[in-house]
């Protein structure tokens, strides 16, 4: 109050500054000290106090910053950095432009996605800010989805189920030319393992997430076991993401991977076409398919509701989660079908393998016509197992440039009829698989 | 957008660089808990900075290491049964730690001689590393009994010797002067002797590798004493083979990018061809197993369980594909007077651990 009466009353400022210091209001104390120095520039005592207060404030802010970073999700952090102006688009960038809305937010358009795909195909890169916007755009939709997503195939609609792509961008583009892009009448469901091994994992995941942002109700993505930190560390995605876009971008991907749904129930809305002898139908008498990356569970009695309710965000399939066969997640990203009945040890050494009887019991208990999964290479791109109740679909042809297999996808219509399409590998620029994996060329034992 | 590039050595340096691969792979397997080896760290420069290898490599390194150890221990056990000490010659040994592991193990008194041979560039570095490391040098013997030789490329001690040679040269030039010349040659022909070739013969022509095996065969054949000769000659070869398929083509291409070729793989396009390595020199016993077979049937199931918990392996198909292209081949050449032998050298091999 003394200052209000006489703004040049130095002593008052000093006393107030002292009060601020004692109540740890450093910013205000500094403001007062600075004001004092304009009134009394020769005052060494004040100058010293200003210096030491600034030091204290810097220390406190720094500690607050590191402490908060630990708790803050990469999504929040990226939003913050964007808001602070820390991720602007480089002025020299000459590629496809992401347009803005009236309030200055970026928005996604089909023209942009088309241009971006061509840009990627030509070996070029988009700005980090665009990658963040695309990932955050997809994130906004993933967080609204449950761990089991329901997709109804309306009359006149089709949905294509796509298996592992593993960073094989040039094969992915060929696949998209066969499936067509998502639109009003046509949806795509990617069943995990978009990244790792192939050396264009970034281009694949960014394209897929761009479609998710653009067509949230026509582009679906299930999480695969390779959408995880431990796999990405070994099989190339971490290296590639950090090399192309830096650490914060990798962290963002790693977190958003945990937001991806774990499975999708694709349901016909029209009665089945053709003979349905023995087919298991939903309670409404429709065909429906449970699409998940790995497979079924280590125990019977798991319901669709159990899966829907899995708390997945932020969950990394760590050692215990995997070893602990009681957990649903992540085993549904890791299990494999086996020919023998019952359950057996997984040939991967962790998790389990499930037999035809397990599949039958589960499908009957849940009114599911069949399960569609991926996770394993199939020479023909797809294979129908467990008396038709379990189909594997794999969409990375000539897997890691070696396996010589075809890729495939499954088209399902409103009546639940399945149609299989196979395709071959396409040429790609001379970058080997696993180019970004640490530990160099993986398959050498000198 | 291209991945980061690294400089690639050329010529012989490229072959020598493969030892670095092996050492780093071993280090990685040790750090991850697959293997125990207190002696590898002093032999790898800046060991703590080296990245770990993928699970596939760690498993392969584990399987190879365990199988080789079992064979070597089997050889030592047979020597004990025979009532004599034995000799081990490790050719292209690189940064191998086997001597030190034997010297600190239960069979240490069975070893009369352990000789390592490699390029001078490699032996010089190893000799220096040994001198610098108390753990390594203390096991060689009393300090006055250990000396460098040949311009720092060789190290001599009572049991362990490190010698420099280019193994592709004719054995009369490269091996004879080192091993069999002089009044007290390091290599005695009347003791059981094991030759170890751990991923080395594949880098030289079949002619060169054949010459080495023939030279040893002749030396032992022609120098057996008329009585009490226990000069049983054994050998272990570990390397890749059957490189004619798609997998092999990719491996060959990957290695070409590193300026490494595999001329020695040519005579071994199939699993069945592997024993000819020794049979062609008139050896009595020759057997082979791939790392895939070894992992499945010749490793203790409890050990397999233990290592499967160490890391998450993505898929088994790739592992088995890689392991199927590496094999351990072993053979025995008995001395002329086999009637005098006590131990069953002809049964030497790996034991099945699974029915």
Image (spheres, grey):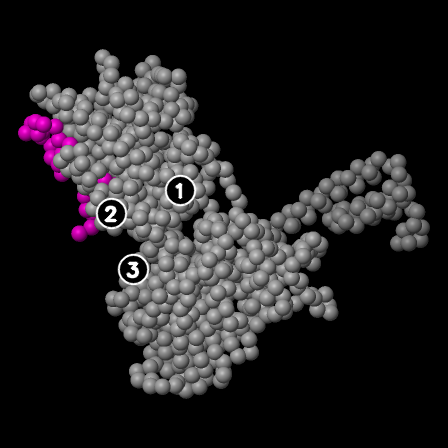
In this rendering, position of residue B315 left or right of residue B235? right
**Gap between marks 3 and 1 measured at Cα:** 36 Å
Q: Residue B339 lies in magenta, yes or no?
A: yes
What is the C-alpha distance between the residues marked 2 and 1?
20 Å
Q: Position of residue B263 (x, y in %)?
A: 32, 38
Q: Quadrant of residue A14?
A: top right
Q: Are marks 3 and 1 on the same chain?
A: no
User: Which segment is the magenta one?
Assistant: B328-355
Instruction: Left or right? Give the position of A196 relative to B219.
Output: right
Pick out the residue farthest to the left.
Answer: B339
| Residue at the spot of label 1 | B255
Question: Which of B211 and A413 lies nearest the eye of the viewer?
Answer: B211
Which residue is depicted at the point 89% across and 43% down? A38
**Residue at the spot of label 3:** A345
- At label 2, counting other C-alpha atoms closer than 10 Å, the crowd grade (few under 14, some 14-19, many 20 or more) is few
Mark 2 vs mark 3: give the one in front. Answer: 2
The answer to which of marks 2 and 1 sits earlier in the sequence is 1
Image spot of residue B173 (x, y percent): 29, 21
């Amino acid at each position: 109050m003394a200052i209000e009466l006489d703004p040049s009353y130095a002593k008052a400022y000093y006393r107030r500054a002292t009060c601020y210091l004692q109540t740890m209001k450093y910013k205000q104390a500094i403001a007062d000290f600075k004001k004092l120095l304009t009134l009394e520039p020769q005052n060494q005592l004040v100058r010293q106090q200003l210096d030491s207060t600034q030091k204290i404030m810097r220390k406190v802010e720094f500690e607050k910053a590191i402490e908060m970073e630990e708790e803050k999700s990469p999504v929040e952090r990226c939003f913050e950095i964007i808001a602070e102006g820390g991720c602007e688009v480089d002025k020299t960038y000459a590629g496809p432009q992401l347009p803005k809305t009236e309030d200055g937010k970026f928005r996604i358009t089909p023209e942009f996605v088309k241009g971006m795909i061509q840009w990627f195909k030509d070996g070029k890169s988009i700005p980090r800010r665009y990658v963040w916007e695309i990932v955050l755009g997809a994130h906004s939709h993933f967080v609204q989805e449950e761990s089991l997503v329901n997709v109804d195939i309306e009359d006149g609609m089709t949905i294509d189920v796509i298996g592992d792509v593993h960073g094989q961008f040039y094969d992915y583009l060929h696949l998209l030319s066969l499936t067509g892009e998502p639109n009003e009448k046509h949806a795509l469901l990617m069943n995990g393992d978009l990244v790792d091994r192939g050396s264009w994992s970034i281009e694949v995941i960014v394209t897929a997430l761009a479609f998710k942002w653009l067509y949230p109700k026509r582009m679906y993505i299930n999480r695969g076991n390779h959408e995880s930190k431990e796999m990405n560390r070994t099989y190339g995605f971490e290296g590639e993401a950090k090399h192309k876009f830096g650490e914060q971008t990798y962290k963002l991907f790693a977190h958003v991977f945990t937001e991806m749904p774990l499975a999708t129930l694709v349901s016909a809305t029209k009665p089945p076409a053709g003979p349905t002898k023995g087919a298991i139908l939903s309670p409404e008498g429709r065909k429906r398919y449970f699409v998940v990356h790995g497979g079924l569970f280590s125990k019977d009695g798991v319901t669709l509701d159990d899966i829907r309710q899995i708390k997945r965000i932020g969950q990394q399939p760590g050692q215990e989660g995997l070893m602990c066969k009681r957990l649903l997640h992540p085993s549904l990203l890791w299990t494999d079908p086996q020919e023998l009945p019952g359950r057996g040890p997984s040939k991967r050494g962790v998790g389990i393998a499930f037999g035809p009887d397990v599949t039958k019991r589960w499908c009957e208990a849940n009114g599911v016509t069949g399960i569609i999964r991926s996770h394993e290479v199939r020479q023909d791109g797809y294979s129908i197992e467990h008396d038709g109740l379990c189909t594997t679909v794999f969409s990375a042809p000539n897997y890691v440039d070696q396996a010589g297999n075809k890729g495939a996808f499954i088209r399902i219509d409103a009546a639940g009829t399945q149609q299989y399409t196979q395709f071959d590998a396409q040429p790609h620029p001379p970058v080997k698989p696993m180019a970004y994996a640490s530990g160099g060329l993986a398959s050498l034992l000198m | 957008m291209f991945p980061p590039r690294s400089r690639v050595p050329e010529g012989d340096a490229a072959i020598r660089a493969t030892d670095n691969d092996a050492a780093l792979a071993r280090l990685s397997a040790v750090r991850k808990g697959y293997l125990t080896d207190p002696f590898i760290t002093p032999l790898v420069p800046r060991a703590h900075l080296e990245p770990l290898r993928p699970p596939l490599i760690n498993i392969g390194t584990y399987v190879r290491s365990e199988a080789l150890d079992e064979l070597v221990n089997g050889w030592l056990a047979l020597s004990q049964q025979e009532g004599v000490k034995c000799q081990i010659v490790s050719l292209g040994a690189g940064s191998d730690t086997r001597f030190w592991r034997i010297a600190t193990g239960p069979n240490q008194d069975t070893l009369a001689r352990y000789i390592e041979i490699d390029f001078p560039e490699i032996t010089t570095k190893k000799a220096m590393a040994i001198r610098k490391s108390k753990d390594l040098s203390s096991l060689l013997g009393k300090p006055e009994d250990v000396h460098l030789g040949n311009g720092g490329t060789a190290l001599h001690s009572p049991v362990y010797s490190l010698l420099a040679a280019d193994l592709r040269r004719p054995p009369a030039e490269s091996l004879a002067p080192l091993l069999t010349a002089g009044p007290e040659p390091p290599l005695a022909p009347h003791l059981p002797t094991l030759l170890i070739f751990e991923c080395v013969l594949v880098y030289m022509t079949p002619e060169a590798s054949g010459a080495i095996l023939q030279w040893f065969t002749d030396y032992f054949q022609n120098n057996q004493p008329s009585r009490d000769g226990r000069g049983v000659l054994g050998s272990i070869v570990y390397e890749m083979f059957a490189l004619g398929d798609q997998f092999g083509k990719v491996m060959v291409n990957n290695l070409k990018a590193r300026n490494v070729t595999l001329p020695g793989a040519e005579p071994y396009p199939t699993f069945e061809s592997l024993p000819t390595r020794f049979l062609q020199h008139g050896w009595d016993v020759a057997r082979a197993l791939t790392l895939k077979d070894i992992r499945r049937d010749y490793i203790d199931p409890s050990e397999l369980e233990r290592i499967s918990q160490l890391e998450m392996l993505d898929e088994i198909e790739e592992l088995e594909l890689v392991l199927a292209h590496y094999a351990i081949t072993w053979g025995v050449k008995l001395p002329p007077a086999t009637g005098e032998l006590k131990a069953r050298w002809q049964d030497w091999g790996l034991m099945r651990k699974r029915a």
